Image: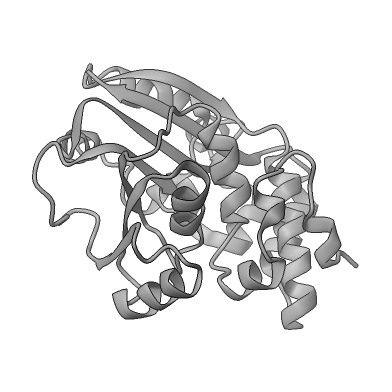
Amino acid sequence: MASLEDLNRPEYPRSSTYDAQWLIDADMGPHPLWLLEDLARDLDLRPGMRVLDLGSGKGATSVFLAREYGVQVWAVDLWVSPDEAAATFEAQGVADQVTALQAEAHALPFAAGTFDAIVCIDAYEYFGTADGYLTYLTKFLKPGGQLGIATPAMTTEIRELGHIPAHIKQCVGWEAIAWHTADWWRFQWAITELVDVTSARLQESGWQDWLLWSQVCAGHTGQPSSTIAMLTADQGEYLSFALVTARKV
């Protein structure tokens, strides 16, 4: 059985300094800090930057951004109340760096050119696959501003497969049609000429990281996990994460 100690990974030295139980209590999917730490290697985040954490969940990624990179963060989520998120930021000592807001991803309450960077960890698949969404989102970036997403991915497009593999369909159903390859994302963004894509890659350890995290969480909650069954059956044949970054033209 996977344990809390298994979460101290040399591949993620920054993430390993965070309390594992706190992260489990904030669980809403795959390990958010592993994804963000890997994604941030392809970004240039500097102290004082204004960063939108879109789909910030219970706030772990916003805490990480503020602490690790010294940026000012606007944490936006639809399902987590600002009061709950703000309490987290206060408890974690970053209340002066992070502002919590509740908003829908297609109705963001910001002026054009507000942000130096926008990051989105394990949420973009819910609202960002529409052809026109990049046009909407990038208006909130300054010229040269950065965009980075970490999103569940397929190693082969479902359109090419002609079906959703059974073990994936059993877990997430039709939602898997929003899981794309890194190459799909590169083309989807680059063809708009709104951004220069700076990286688009599949995370080599994506499915293994996701499985380990799910096993640790299940061990602590005692609840069965369909995600564990999906990833165990997959063994990296189809599933990973796409890490995609770009700069606004």
x 38%, y 45%: residue: 71
Q: Nearer the viewer, residue 38 or 15?
A: 15
Q: Quadrant of residue 21?
A: bottom right
The relative height of residue 191 versus residue 202 in the rendered view (above or below) is above
Whether residue 161 is visible, yes or no, is: yes
Residue 166 in percent (x, y) is at: 65, 53
Q: Nearer the viewer, residue 177 or 195?
A: 195
**Left-right relation of 195 to 1:** left
The residue most toward the bottom is 222
Residue 156 in percent (x, y) is at: 59, 30
Residue 97 in percent (x, y) is at: 35, 57
**Left-right relation of 169 to 56:** right
The relative height of residue 87 versus residue 43 in the rendered view (above or below) is below
x 54%, y 44%: residue: 36
x 38%, y 79%: residue: 84
Residue 203 in percent (x, y) is at: 64, 34
